[in-house]
Amino acid sequence: MRGSDELLSQTGAVSNGSVMSPAPNHADNNNDAKKVKLDTKNPGAPSRVIHIRNIPNEVTEAEIVHLGIPFGKVTNVLVLKGKNQAFLEMSDEVSATTMVNYFTNCTAQLRGRAVYVQFSNHKELKTDQTHSNAQNPSAQAALQAAQALVNQSDTQGGPNTVLRVIVEHMIYPVTLDVLYQIFSRVGKVLKIVTFTKNNTFQALIQYPDVVTAQAAKMTLDGQNIYNACCTLRIEYSKLSNLNVKYNNDKSRDYTNPSLPTGDPALDSALAIGAPNLNLPNRTGENATPTGMPFTGMPLAGVTPTAAALGAAGIRLPGQPSPNCVLLVSNLNEEMVTPDALFTLFGVYGDVQRVKILFNKKDNALVQMSEPHQTQLAISHLDKMKTWGKQIRVTLSKHQTVQLPKEGQPDAGLTKDYSNSPLHRFKKPGSKNYQNIYPPSATLHLSNIPPTVDEEQIKEAFTQAGAVVKAFKFFPHASNIKEDARDAGETEEQTGTPTGLVKTPFKDRKMALIQLGSVEEAIGALIKMHNFQLSDSSHLRVSFSKSTI
């Protein structure tokens, strides 16, 4: 247990620079000052009670507790909202002294406002029975959560600037840039290293100080990046510093943007200043990261404030828009067309626009409808051999693909697909995302009319330049439901729910066709998806995880 759910629903994370702010508490606090029984001592003398001044009116007890957690056990808290002050009682003077010394050299902030931390005149924080924490659920929850966190830290090692993050139930891809977007909402991220261990995606994330790392752990541990999946499990790393050698999709040092990528071709191109080779965040630590999680799916349990919603991928007015544009390079100029790229990238998201660059026709920009779709396309299509060349797929510096102005020559190199009926993922959170597979030599075919037989389909693929190695129909209705799910054919593609086989659905045959190579299958999918088989039927083609 990480502590009270109420803590997550009422509070945000405090750091030296950014805050995930909760909703304001409008309780009447005019008489809060009466809660304290004064034990006046020499001002400025060490005490386990800490006095915090200049706090914002809406600050909660939990936010005050967050300030003290990295330095030791917090035993009591009192917020005097009417006087913009708070008191925090630590378990001993050593912890309190460490905290005061730390914030003497590094200004503490709550909700963007600088607050002042000093020793209190009181040696002990006493409250009368009427205003005790037993009568204050939010204070009680904050203290309970703090105690649970301390107990957990005892088994994992003490607070550290480096966090170890494990992503459980990773149905959708989680990238370094997605993690940066989430964790940078809590505070400044210095370095990230990602890796896979025991078939689980993990990351090490370094913050500049213990306070920020503590806030990130308390705020994000146990949260889902996407609805009901990609759960973050966070603990303190045994490392105190990360040694990053390369800035690429596996590791990043945001304090040193000049590090090589580890890819000789990209490094040499970047060294000579080649345009349009857009490695994310190579422009310095203030670059806008890309790769946001699903729009509209906030981290469960976190208060939906501006910062928290930003961490969950929800766009708010005034926030920079996450990038949906891909740069595709090393294309075969003789073969590439906007329609071909629309079909290929449409396997991994709904393509809105495509532009083949006029002066560099082996490069193209592809705009997807959602940022996570760009990550899917990168993970499945980057370095994939297509039309005889290994294409490269990276994020572009462009936020949108511009359509040519009226009368401007374009030669058909730019096309808008925003109203295309061929989009596979029209519904938000489409189940098709759960059935996306990398390019394979075996293709799944659906929407085949009863009048078309095996030989006709094989002949059509042969005429498209493919070598057919094997073919298999799914003839039985009992198999259709399972195979449709395997191939990612849901009601959004076939018109019928996969969980309920209806008579019209039985009549639409489905099949697997195995070709000579993955490259052949990519070319065949581009040519044969939406191929007209009859007056009323167009073939649907996708990559399959099955073999024949």
Image: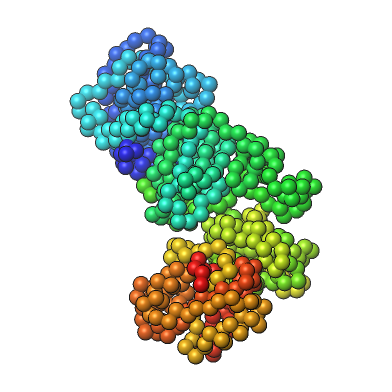
Q: Nearer the viewer, residue 516 or 367?
A: 516
**Residue at image point 75% right, 73% down:** 411
Residue at the limit of the structure toward the left, as seen here: 129
Q: Nearer the viewer, residue 37 or 488?
A: 488
Q: Quadrant of residue 286?
A: top right
* Residue 365 visible, this orientation: no
Taking 127 as reference, is 432 left or right? right
Taking 377 as reference, is 23 left or right? left
* Residue 174 visible, this orientation: yes
**Residue at image point 43% right, 27% down:** 158
Q: How many marks?
A: 0
**Residue 517 at what x, y percent from top left?**
62, 69
Q: Nearer the viewer, residue 15 or 421?
A: 421
Taking 334 as reference, is 483 left or right? left
Q: Nearer the viewer, residue 410 or 519?
A: 519
Taking 246 as reference, is 184 left or right? left
**Residue 473 at what x, y percent from top left?**
48, 80
**Residue at image point 49% right, 86% down:** 449
Color theme of the render: rainbow
**Residue at image point 20% right, 28% down:** 130
Looking at the rendered image, the quarter that the N terminus falls into is top left
Against 459, is 519 above or below? Answer: above
**Residue 108 at what x, y percent from top left?**
48, 28
Against 68, is 370 above or below? Answer: below
**Residue 493 at what x, y percent from top left?**
47, 74
